[in-house]
Each structure stands twice: as structure tokens, then as C-alpha cells.
Amino acid sequence: MSRLEDAKAIQKSDPAKAEAEYKAILSRKPDTTDAALKEYEQALLALGELYRDGGRTQELAALVEQTMSVLNQFAKSKTNKLVRQMIDLFSTIPDTLDIQITLTKSCIQWAVNERRTFLRQGLETRLIALYLEKNAYKDAIDLINTLLREIKRLDDKMVLVEVQLLESRAYHALRNIPKSRASLSAARTSANAVYCPPLMQAGLDMQSGILHAEEKDFNTAYSYFIEAMEGYHTQDETKKATDALKYMLLCRIMENQTDEVNSILVGKHALKYAGRDLEAMKAIARAHTDKSLAAFEQALNSYKDELTADRFIRSHSTDLYDNLLQQNLLRVIEPFSRVEIAHIAKLVGLDTPQVEAKLSRMILDKKLSGVLDQGTGCLIIFEETGKDKSYDAAIATIKKLSDVVDVLYTNQAALLD
């Protein structure tokens, strides 16, 4: 049994000794033979995994930095893969976003110095994704613009699709929906020219569903989320598959199709990805069906992380809550022509300022005909009056008279000529 195999055998039982063995292997300058380079690569990844499992982020970052000088002895394709594998080790360690950004920038600088163009482009693409995760949208957009100009000259379709998809996500996060849709359309056009891997296709479907949901086309969004979920499911991307399943449930809730929500929750995929995420969507669906503000608020409090951490879920659950609040307010004030705001707040179980703000917005949006009397703290509801059709008739008559006058003027001008 080799020294490397011995270290792997005791990695879990005696990590300190295994670490020492890995370091001993890495301290020797590797030969250029395939066997020596393979042993060095395996020891490097094994030590990185040991640091990852122990949450030793500083040591892991230092390991990546230290091995940069040795990577010149590897083939370029092997170097690219190895660097990405080492950086990927951070993805499962929480609260390492800043370290990942710093380390990725350092690797990019090394790739620039070594003139490794494809590695640099891959690392810059990863850096964009990290910027989006950190909500540093300006940095992401600036890097995207620079990288897109270069990639378009090289005509590298695969990288182009990935960067354009990231661009769509960045603009969506900035609420620039037209630019986000344009970037997604460009990404799909580029993807049609090459083979698109399943994960990339699932990402395109996920973003398409999100943008259709922004336009309130929840049926089309639902079909895209199904495709995305199937794609992530086949690639064992549990987190992303769960997100797609949550978005499917949200679309059905937004369409008031809670029966389908229950059907999805007892399906085979829901059983595999069962957990607090799906329980949160189930609670939202139940509250929406019962039209209960109290149940909705309880769900928001009980599943705060699951419903607020995701920007898409947070945005649409807020819309659901506002619609539910509006329906409850309209039902409560229906018997009254004048009612105290405090009494309305008591009936719906909310604070008076919150109810007053919502009533004010409903009046401005012309969803409620009335006025707020802040002096007395009352809402005065106006009687609904039917539309007077005489105005439309008068406008139509005036238009016809205008047409007649135009014809007479044209005829008179022709006679004078």
C-alpha cells in the first residue's frame, strides 16, 4: 500500500496523521511522470477535502495559493480542472463568500500572468456568480460587459451562454426585467448553436420560469419550472431541484389551484425533497385557501428563513399577502358607509397604521372608492355609481361631426381649385 493510500485509510480515524502524510507528499517537488503528477494531484485534493470537512478555510485558501507555483508542471487542461476543483471545495463551507472572492481574484491574476486565457475566463465567470451571491451587482455587471466583448470575439458559445445567463440574473436582481429578458433570449440563441449540458439547460429553464412569473404568466412559468426541476433532479442537484419544486408550488398558489399543490406534495419528487422548504409552501397554500391573514403571518414567522432568504419566493409571497389583505379589507368594510379605521384593524387582526396605509394605497389604486378622514380616524366609503353612458355617446357624436366637417372642407377646397 502506497503512502497516499495509507493516508486516505486513516483520514477519518486520525486526521492529524493523514494531514502530515499529505503534506509530506506535497513537499516533494513532483516528477514530470504521469504517476508522480497523479499522486501529487490526489494528495492535493485529499488534503483540501480534509480542510473542508474540518471547516479550516484559512488553511484551505493557503493551500490553493501555495500550489499555484507547482501547477505549471501540469498540462493546461489538467491545471484548469484542478484549480476549479480546489475552489469548489469552499462551496459547501458556510460564510466563506469573501474568502472565495479573494481567492478567485488571486487565481485570476495567476492565470493572467501565465497567459492561461481559458482558465481566466472560467474563473471570471465564477467570480461573477460569487458577486451575484454577495449582491454586488455593479461589480458583476462591469465584469460581464468586459468578458462578453472578449468571448464574442473568440466565439466561445459555451462560455457565452453561461455569462449571458448570469447577465440575465444580474439584471433581474436589479429589477431591469426588459434587459434580463433580452440577455436570456441571447443565451438561448447561443445555446441553440452548441450542445447544451443538462445543468446549463436547467438553468435556462429556471430563469425563463422566473421571468414569466414576473409577468404574471404563472402557467407558462410552471411548465418551465417542471423542466428545470427534472434537469436538476437527473443531475442530483438537490438544492436547485428543491428550489424549482418550491417555485412550481408557488405558481399553483398564485393561480388559486391549491388542489394541484396537494397533488404535487404527495408526488415522488416531493417525497425525495421533503423538508422545511416544502412545509413552508404547504403552510402558505393552506393560509391562502382559508383566506386567513393570521395563518399567513404565522407561516411567515414559522418559516422565516425558507420564505425570506429566496428573493423570488419573498417577492411573490409578499404579493400573495397584499392580495389576501386587500380581499379581507374589502369583505370587512362591505356593510359600512363610514367606519373607524381602528375597528377595521381589530376585525382583521392587524395594527391600525398598517391597515391605514393599505387602505390609502387601495384608494390611490382605485380599488376602493372612498376617502380617509384622518381627523376622526374614519374611512368614508362612497356609493358605487354606474358609468354615465351619455359621455361616451357625446364623444362619439362629436367625432362623427368632426369627420363630416373634414369631408366638407376637403370638398370645398377641391371646388376652389
Image (cartoon, helix red, strand yellow):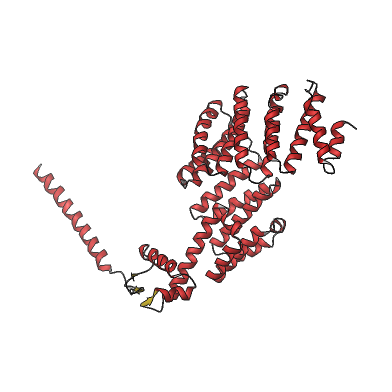
**Residue 378 appears in which quarter of the rendering?**
bottom left
Rendering coords of residue 221 (x, y %) = 55, 53
Say if 371 sits above or below 216 in the image: below
Is 134 left, or right, of 63 in this rendering? left
Numbered label tally: 0
Rendering coords of residue 403 (x, y %) = 20, 54
Pick the quarter of the image with the C terminus: top left
Residue at (38, 77) in percent of width and height: 339
Say if 191 sits above or below 263 in the image: above
Residue at (72, 56) in percent of width and height: 272
Is 283 left, or right, of 393 in this rendering? right
Between 97 and 188, the residue placed more toward the observer is: 97
As drawn, which residue projects farthest toward the top?
32
Rendering coords of residue 345 (x, y %) = 45, 73
Task: Determine if residue 180 is in view.
Answer: yes
**Residue 394 appears in which quarter of the rendering?**
bottom left
Say if 304 sits above or below 127 in the image: below
Task: Determine if residue 291 is in view.
Answer: no
Say if 213 sits above or below 290 in the image: above
Between 88 and 30, the residue placed more toward the observer is: 30
